[in-house]
């Protein structure tokens, strides 16, 4: 599924020099899944260094990876640190699930050296472990006679989290009320749209409607009571019917994040009848298209 990625990671891991680190010897409690003492966090970088280990006859070294998710990628490599040309010890490398089943295996990094390297994509959620043993012990029970220091490098590449769309549930118009009704056009912004992933969000006005007929006294240059459809900002006229119960504009919009997630909503703007007892608008619904001069 990810062969190009795997090949690149294997090249990086098998060519990376070993770093300095404390030697973990056979006396440490790491000979089985149950006693794996070292833990590599799921957020480990692309070349996390686990440390220098000492392999002795009968030894198996287990390293815990904790709880992984389907789609996470495990990469691991051993680099021999003993002998002429660093060819000792001859290791094998495996990945085990929590039930003790071996789910990945490598010997000699594809035939390139006594070191080992592998890349494995997790197919089901659960706890996983990397194990190192000596050549001749494919069951990882310690049945080998290899010895020497080796460096172990492990990395965990988390699967990309699914994109969460923007949230339009708290959207509102600002300003929410226009006064005085001087029939001038006022810019209206939509605020309160959030994105759970923190992605940038682009907002587009899709419609502007009102619950009263369009303003009667208008000129050829200002016949519509709403504008801005297709842009990120609406404009509506500060006007209302003198015999009505206040004008309500309904501004429809769509918000899209940079990964294609989207939500839609409607925000309202009130133009009250007056500032006395009738200062609250009664919404009769989006009856008229505010951008249609002929409505």
Image: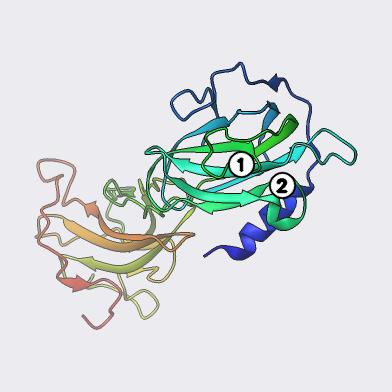
Q: Is residue 41 left or right of residue 295?
A: right
Q: How many marks?
A: 2
* Above or below for 104 versus 208: above
Residue lying furthest top in this view?
Answer: 27
Marker disc for residue 236: none
Q: Between marks 2 and 1, how big is the CA–CA gap?
A: 9 Å
- Residue matched to label 1: 155
Camera-side residue of 166 and 236: 166
Residue at image position (18%, 58%) is 247
- Residue matched to label 2: 13
Q: Quadrant of residue 249?
A: bottom left
Q: Position of residue 209 (x, y in %)?
A: 23, 68
Residue at image position (82%, 41%) is 87
Q: Quadrant of residue 89?
A: top right
Q: Badge 1: how crowded within 10 Å, few (<14), some, or many (20+)?
A: many
Q: Badge 2: how crowded within 10 Å, few (<14), some, or many (20+)?
A: many
Colour scheme: rainbow
Residue at image position (72%, 20%) is 22
Camera-side residue of 35 and 222: 35
């Amino acid at each position: 599924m990810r062969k190009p990625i795997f090949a690149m990671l294997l090249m990086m891991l098998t060519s990376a020099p070993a770093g300095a680190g404390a030697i973990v010897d056979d006396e440490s409690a790491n000979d089985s899944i149950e006693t794996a003492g070292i833990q590599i966090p799921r957020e480990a970088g692309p070349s996390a260094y686990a440390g220098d280990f000492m392999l002795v006859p009968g030894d198996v070294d287990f390293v815990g990876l904790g709880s992984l998710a389907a789609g996470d990628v495990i990469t691991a490599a051993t680099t021999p640190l003993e002998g002429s040309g660093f060819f000792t010890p001859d290791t094998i490398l495996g990945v085990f699930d929590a039930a003790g089943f071996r789910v990945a295996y490598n010997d000699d990094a594809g035939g390139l050296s006594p070191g080992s390297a592998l890349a494995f994509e997790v197919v089901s959620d659960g706890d996983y472990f990397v194990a190192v043993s000596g050549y001749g012990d494919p069951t990882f029970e310690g049945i080998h006679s290899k010895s020497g220091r080796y460096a172990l490098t492990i990395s965990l590449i988390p699967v990309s989290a699914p994109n969460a769309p923007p949230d339009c549930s708290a959207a509102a118009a600002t300003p929410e009320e226009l006064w005085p009704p001087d029939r001038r056009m006022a810019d209206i912004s939509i605020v309160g749209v959030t994105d759970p992933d923190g992605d940038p969000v682009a907002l587009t006005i899709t419609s502007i409607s009102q619950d009263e007929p369009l303003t009667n006294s208008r000129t050829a240059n200002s016949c519509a009571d709403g504008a801005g459809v297709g842009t990120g900002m609406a404009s509506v006229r500060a006007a209302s019917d003198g015999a009505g119960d206040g004008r309500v504009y309904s501004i429809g919009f769509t918000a899209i994040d940079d990964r294609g997630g989207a939500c839609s909503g409607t925000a309202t703007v009130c133009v009250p009848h007056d500032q006395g007892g009738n200062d609250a608008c009664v919404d009769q619904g989006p009856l008229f298209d505010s951008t249609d001069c002929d409505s």
